[in-house]
Amino acid sequence: MMLRLDTHEGELSLIFSHNNVKIIHGRKVETVSLLKIKSKTNESPFGGQIVFETGSILTYLQVRNEIFLHYLGDTWSFRRKERELALSGNDSPEIKSPMPGKIIQMFGEPGKKFSRGETILILEAMKMENAIKAPFDCQVNQVLRSQGEIVQQDEPLILLDKI
């Protein structure tokens, strides 16, 4: 499996095979052996903890296309490259929930216009607020879910018309 990430210092690629991870950053290539895992807890599909045989703990969380890791007192954040590329060409008339959560603010209503990048609604997931933005200049055609509702991942929330 290969994963491409954007970091503050440029693109980073991770190639996983058996107990090794090959890390490619520019022209620099390193191979790291993974520690033996003692236990793993998935607090949700988007986060959890891995306890290694050494007693060290890796905590991870994914929010949309951003990944957060906390290990041995250090915290890192990365953006998934594939997700960003996939979102850049979004012409779908549907706004879908990127993750399970609760709609805590709904700014969209039928007939209301939004510019590309403007917040249409705010979804709360794992006590974090996620602004769902207009993928293009649009007008709301239909609101499918209301403020306060719990929604599942990929559930349609709003139908848009391009303007």
Image: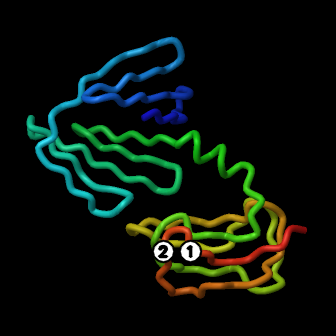
Q: Is residue 24 left or right of residue 142?
A: left
Q: Type of residue at label 2? A: Gln
Q: Residue furthest right?
A: 163
Q: Position of residue 131 (x, y in %)?
A: 59, 66
Task: Give the answer, above or below, for where 17 lies relative to 44.
Answer: above
Q: Which residue is mark 2?
A: 152
- Please tell me how crowded label 1 is: few (under 14), some (14-19), or many (20+) other residues with Cα within 10 Å: some
Rendered residue at 44%/47% (across/down): 67
Q: Within the image, what quadrant is residue 74 found in?
A: top left
Secondary structure found at label 1:
loop
Q: Which residue is mark 1?
A: 155
Q: How is the image coloured?
A: rainbow
Depth check, front residue: 18 or 52: 18
* Left or right: where 44 falls relative to 140: left
Question: Which quarter of the figure has residue 46?
Answer: bottom left
Q: Nearer the viewer, residue 76 or 49?
A: 49
At a point 25% along the width and 28% down the height, the residue shown is 19
Secondary element type, mark 2:
loop
Dot 2 alpha-carbon crowd within 10 angstroms: few under 14, some 14 to 19, many 20 or more: few
Image quadrant where one finds the N terminus:
top left
**Pick the front one: 53 or 114:** 53
Q: Residue at x 53, y 50 (%)?
A: 65
Taking the spot 52% from the left edge, 56% from the top edge, the residue there is 64
The C terminus, quarter of image: bottom right
The span from disc 2 to disc 1 (Cα, nearest Å) is 6 Å
Please, what is the three-letter code of the amino acid marked with disc 1?
Glu
Residue 101: image location, x then y, percent: 46, 74
Where residue 159 appears, x then y in whole percent? 73, 77
* CB under 8 Å between discs 2 and 1: yes
Above or below: residue 97 compared with residue 136: below
Q: Residue furthest top?
A: 27
User: On the image, which quarter does residue 82 sit in?
Assistant: top right
